[in-house]
């Protein structure tokens, strides 16, 4: 199918009546044209939108597709967007991707993440205790869902939490698809400069943290100080932004499906299964994953020509009725939920997924154990969802209990 001006405009807009469901356009296209061209904001780029689970896995698992956004027809979030530094390795192909990823692999091994669980449980308890000291409605985002993952990633990296306002501001610019390419690049640079100073400080005062170990790798010549800082800034940004939004959206989802909460509270195995279903159901990567074909590739019954861009809609693929029974229903006991694509698939899948899973497995049951009468303090239509960010979530969430 050639690119035409009649290609539907790619939009992130969710229905006001069903803000937790994927954008209606994407769902409609999955049923009518599961691999079809769409038109991006500039009117010049017409990438293919992939919306079925099986096709999404095919694209994400194939070395015939590149993550390099500097390729001529790569689907970009904003005009003038440069590729991030090496530390933002998700935008690079192998061998650079593999080299940078190896510097962090040990930090997110299951054994190491499990050692963090008592600390995550302690922070959860402390934040809930502090939140419940307030009278009247409080903002769940401000008091719980944002500080929890921010505190965890700061502790893991060795970043002072008192600087959280600064790095959250920079992260907000990076994920805002309405920000210009220059603004996003400046935020990435600013965050990187901040981390460079921290990496160098770790040489004088080492700790048991990721930045100290990255500084040691820089001393050995494996990476540069700048690489270490960029890896740290990427983790700082990614490590709190996605999980914070998942906690808030999961809370809304469970309050809208209260019959599911007893299953969540049924023990560790059921909490683990519940988290996988929440990840499938919500899929907070909003813009979708982006690739460019390095050769002609046939996916399903469509041949994507060399050089064409592709957007994989994770949220719609994770609601594919051909793969999931009653795909639009939340079912915490769903047997195949873990086969979701919320963390991507293939060599570029999310490195930090063991940490994200651990946080959600601890936080969500404890939240509803501690606050069985938790409720949202505003009508559903007044909840402010993030429509213009690459990570979906809410700006604030007033709650009572």
Image (cartoon, grey):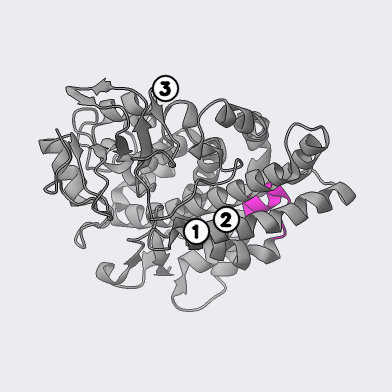
**Residue 20 lies in magenta, yes or no?**
no
What residue is at 14 percent from the left and 49 percent from the top? 5
Element type at mark 3 = loop
- Residue 108: give x, y in percent of width and height: 62, 34
In this view, the residue in front, 209 or 228, is 228
The quarter of the displayed image where residue 87 is located: top right
Query: Do the residues bearing badges 3 and 2 touch, measured as CB atoms within 8 Å?
Result: no
Task: Give the alpha-carbon distance from disc 3 to disc 1, as whole Å.
Answer: 28 Å
Task: Give the alpha-carbon distance from disc 3 to disc 2, as whole Å.
Answer: 27 Å
Query: Do the residues bearing badges 2 and 1 touch, measured as CB atoms within 8 Å?
Result: yes
Residue 184: give its label: 1
Would you say 165 lies left or right of 295 here? right
Extreme residue toward the right, this view: 204
The quarter of the displayed image where residue 300 is located: top left
Query: In the rendered image of this protein, does residue 315 appear above or below residue 16?
Result: above
Element type at mark 2 = helix
Q: Which residue is mark 2?
A: 188
Residue 63: give its label: 3
Element type at mark 1 = helix
- Residue 25: give x, y in percent of width and height: 17, 49
Identify the image quadrant of the C terminus: bottom left
Mark 3 burial class by Cα count in 10 Å: few <14, some 14-19, many 20+: some
- Residue 390: give x, y in percent of width and height: 40, 53
Q: How many marks?
A: 3
Mark 2 burial class by Cα count in 10 Å: few <14, some 14-19, many 20+: many
Would you say 3 lies left or right of 267 here? left
In this view, the residue in front, 105 or 261, is 105
Which region of the structure is painted magenta?
A: 151-160
Circle nearer the N terminus (3, 1): 3
């Amino acid at each position: 199918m050639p690119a035409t001006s009649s290609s539907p405009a790619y939009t992130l807009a969710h229905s006001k009546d069903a803000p937790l469901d994927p954008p209606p356009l994407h769902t409609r296209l999955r049923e009518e044209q599961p691999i079809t061209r769409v038109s991006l904001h500039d009117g010049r780029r017409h990438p293919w939108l992939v919306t079925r689970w099986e096709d999404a896995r095919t694209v994400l698992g194939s070395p015939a597709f590149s993550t390099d956004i500097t390729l001529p027809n790569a689907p970009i979030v904003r005009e003038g967007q440069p590729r991030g530094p090496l530390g933002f390795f998700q935008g690079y192909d192998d061998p650079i991707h593999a080299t940078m990823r190896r510097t962090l692999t040990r930090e997110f091994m299951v054994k190491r993440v499990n050692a963090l669980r008592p600390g995550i449980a302690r922070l959860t308890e402390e934040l809930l205790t502090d939140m419940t000291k307030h009278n009247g409605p409080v903002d769940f985002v401000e008091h719980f869902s944002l500080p929890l993952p921010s505190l965890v990633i700061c502790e893991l990296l060795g970043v002072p939490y008192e600087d959280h306002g600064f790095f959250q501001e920079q992260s907000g610019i990076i994920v805002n698809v309405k920000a210009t390419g220059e603004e996003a690049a400046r935020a990435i640079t600013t965050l990187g400069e901040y981390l460079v100073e921290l990496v160098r400080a770790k040489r004088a005062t080492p700790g048991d943290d990721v930045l100290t170990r990255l500084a040691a790798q820089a001393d050995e010549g494996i990476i540069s100080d700048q690489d270490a800082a960029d890896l740290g800034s990427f983790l700082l940004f990614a490590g709190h932004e996605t999980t914070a939004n998942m906690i808030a959206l999961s809370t809304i989802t469970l309050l809208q499906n209260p019959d599911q909460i007893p299953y969540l509270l049924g023990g560790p195995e059921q909490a683990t299964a519940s988290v996988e279903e929440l990840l499938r159901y919500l899929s907070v990567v909003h813009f979708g994953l982006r690739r460019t074909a390095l050769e002609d590739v046939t996916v399903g019954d469509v041949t994507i020509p060399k050089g064409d861009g592709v957007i994989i809609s994770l949220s719609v693929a994770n609601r594919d009725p051909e793969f999931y029974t009653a795909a639009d229903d939340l079912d915490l006991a769903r047997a195949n939920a873990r086969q979701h694509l919320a963390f991507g698939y293939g060599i570029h899948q999310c490195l930090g997924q063991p940490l994200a899973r651990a946080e959600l497995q601890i936080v969500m049951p404890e939240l509803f154990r501690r606050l069985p009468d938790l409720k949202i303090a505003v009508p559903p239509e007044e909840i402010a969802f993030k429509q213009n960010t690459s990570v979906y979530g809410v700006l604030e969430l007033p709650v009572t209990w």
